[in-house]
Image (tube, helix red, strand yellow):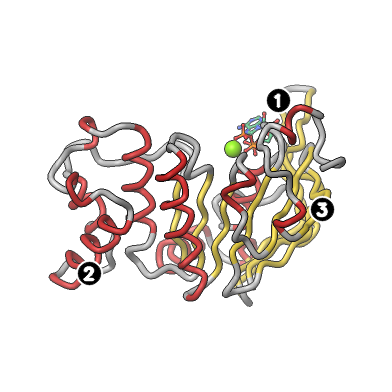
Amino acid sequence: MLGCERASLAYTDGERTTYALRDVTVTLAPGRFYGIMGPSGSGKSSLLYVLSGLKPPTEGSARFGGFVYNQHSSADVTRLRREKFGFVFQQPFLMSYLTVAENVVLAAPQVDRAARDKAARFLDDLGLSDMIHKFPSQLSGGEKQRVSVARAMMNDPEVIFADEPTASLDHANGHRVVDTLAAWRTRGTVVVVTHDPEMLADADEVLLLRDGVLVESRPPESLPSEPKALHRTGTVAPI
Ligand SMILES: Nc1ncnc2c1ncn2[C@@H]1O[C@H](COP(=O)(O)OP(=O)(O)OP(=O)(O)O)[C@@H](O)[C@H]1O
Ligand SMILES: [Mg+2]
């Protein structure tokens, strides 16, 4: 089980302290697809960083199974992350001097024929089969984002963390990305941050954050179908 217990993440800048997360306790099970929603600045990316061990919480703890991150060296946490987790960051980082296919294949633990076939299959699933020989500078933002989704799956991760993977995609490609990620739940846990409730129609559970606080966890059918509703009210409580 992936989770955090009473986790807070505070940033101190001189006299001022900002809480990106406050006292968050959550458990995420394998075989499930979780959505994380909330207004901008509510702590969604911070929660992904804490759950994945990328950032140690300033209070509380986070863990993957029996592996409690703050009981291990940062080198061990990095190794766990590399072996067990896949990431799609809010800003896709691709190697500019490698082609699309190379960017994806190189994320495999072993670069061989099987890895190349797997990369081609993922890229095809994501509608990128015509792009495999292109370089990142020749791609749109949404195409780069899809390449980073393919890359995140190459090490057969037990958890995929995706931070707004559909933000720069049109409707059809957004669904294609979410369907690809959602299908991964047969192999592990999928955690997707998004502003668009429509992308979470198939999620098992949606975590709602507000000002760093986990305000609610609910099934996706109770989310509004119109994305702006969350922001129009300035609060997640009434939806
Ligand atoms: N390095 C930092 N130093 C200081 N404050 C930070 C830092 N990173 C994030 N914050 C603050 O922590 C809060 C939560 O940030 P976070 O990036 O987790 O929000 P978010 O919900 O992912 O927002 P968005 O939807 O815009 O991506 C915000 O108020 C942000 O300004
Ligand atoms: Mg964010």
The residue carrying mark 1 is 13
Report the residue marked by disc 2.
Answer: 110
Nearer-the-camera pick, 63 or 225: 225
Looking at the rendered structure, the secondary structure element under dot 2 is loop
Q: Quadrant of ligand 2?
A: top right
Percent coordinates x, y for residue 21 in the rendering: 75, 44
Image quadrant occupied by the N terminus: bottom right
State the residue position of label 3. Answer: 216
Cα distance in 3D space between marks 1 and 2: 43 Å
Look at label 2 and name its amino acid. Gln
Is disc 1 in contact with disc 3, using a CB cutoff of under 8 Å? Answer: no
**Is the residue indicated by label 1 positioned so its CB lies within 8 Å of ligand 1?**
yes
Q: Earlier in the sequence, mark 1 or mark 2?
A: 1
Locate residue 211, reporting x and y percent.
Answer: 79, 37
Residue 77 or 191: which is nearer the viewer? 191
Whether the residues at callouts 2 and 3 have beta carbons within 8 Å, the answer is: no
Q: Is residue 28 left or right of residue 216?
A: left
The type of residue carrying mark 1 is Asp
Q: Nearer the viewer, residue 187 or 57?
A: 187
Give the residue at x 80% y 40%.
236
Q: Which mark is residue 137?
A: none
At mark 3, the secondary structure is strand
Q: Position of residue 168 (x, y in %)?
A: 44, 34
